[in-house]
Amino acid sequence: MDPSTICLSVFVALISMVAMFRIYKMNSFRMGVASDRSQTMCNACHAITPRAEANCLRCGKPLRTV
């Protein structure tokens, strides 16, 4: 193999690794944003309630699960 082919192969490999890293970071950011939703709104009284609760803290009605 001549040196230009080796350099091109290394360059393509590096570009591929950078692209895969960016895709990984983008997907991990999306997962983090989706898991940060810690509150929900009650459909009956429109009170903000923690997502961990099964019922609204103000009116006691069950929260809708999505």
Image (spheres, helix red, strand yellow):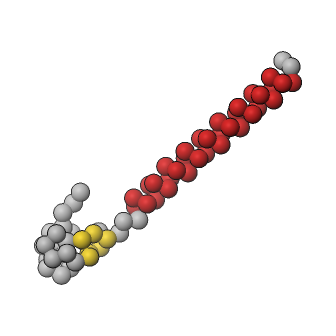
Name the image quarter holding the C terminus: bottom left
| Residue drawn at point x = 15 percent, y = 77 percent | 45
User: Closer to the camera, 39 or 46?
Assistant: 46
Task: Kindly indicate the quadrant of the structure image that contains residue 51.
Answer: bottom left
Task: Kindly indicate the quadrant of the structure image that contains residue 63.
Answer: bottom left
| Residue drawn at point x = 65 percent, y = 39 percent | 17
User: What is the x, y in percent for residue 19?
Assistant: 61, 41
User: What is the x, y in percent for residue 53?
Assistant: 25, 71
Q: Is residue 52 visible?
A: no
User: What is the x, y in percent for residue 32?
Assistant: 46, 59
Q: Residue furthest right?
A: 3
Q: Residue furthest bottom?
A: 58
Q: Residue 27, relative to residue 35: is it above or below? A: above
Q: Residue 1, relative to residue 29: is it above or below? A: above
Q: Residue 23, relative to residue 45: is it above or below? A: above
Q: In this view, does 8 lie to the left or right of 45?
A: right
Name the image quarter holding the N terminus: top right
| Residue drawn at point x = 44 percent, y = 55 percent | 31
Q: In this view, does 16 lie to the left or right of 27?
A: right
Q: How many marks?
A: 0
| Residue drawn at point x = 31 percent, y = 71 percent | 39
